[in-house]
Image (cartoon, rainbow, N blue to C red):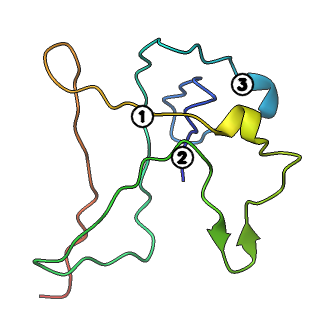
Amino acid sequence: MGLPALSMKLARQRIREYRSSDVLPVENGVIYECDFELWPTNVVVEAGGWLVFKVSSVDTEGAGLFKHISPTDRPLSKFEGTNYIHFGEGHENYIVLPIIPGDS
């Protein structure tokens, strides 16, 4: 679903290629600006409905066949922690969502 915050390597072109060798260290106490993508796939939110964003210090477990539970590639020493989202002056926060009109 986009670029993990751990990668901290931003690519602005339409086709992106991220490799594990691109990962840069993240220092505790440093504020990093992150961009995350929400791809327009099959999510439909009806008028008045809710779209919930979850920020977590661990990778989600996934669903169905797509599980993310391996202690080898997701050790707690790397993925356990506390996240802070900074709001206010000097911190630009926004969400850009794709709006795909339905049949008229």
Q: Under tag 2, what secondary structure?
A: loop
Q: Where is residue 72 in the image (x, y as percent from the top left)?
A: 89, 46
67 vs 33, left or right, is: right
> Going 19% across and 88% down the picture, which residue do you hit?
103
Report the residue marked by disc 3. 23
Report the residue marked by disc 1. 35
Residue type beneath disc 2 = Gly
Image quarter for residue 104?
A: bottom left
> Going 33% across and 32% down the picture, which residue do you hit?
85
How packed mark 1 is, by other alpha carbons closer than 10 Å (few <14, some 14-19, many 20 or more), is: some
Q: Where is residue 28 in the image (x, y as percent from the top left)?
A: 55, 15
Q: Distance between the residues labelled 2 and 3?
A: 14 Å
Residue type beneath disc 3 = Val
Could you say which disc has been placed on residue 59 in the image?
Answer: none
Could you say which disc has been placed on residue 2 in the image?
Answer: 2
Q: Position of residue 9 (x, y in %)?
A: 59, 23
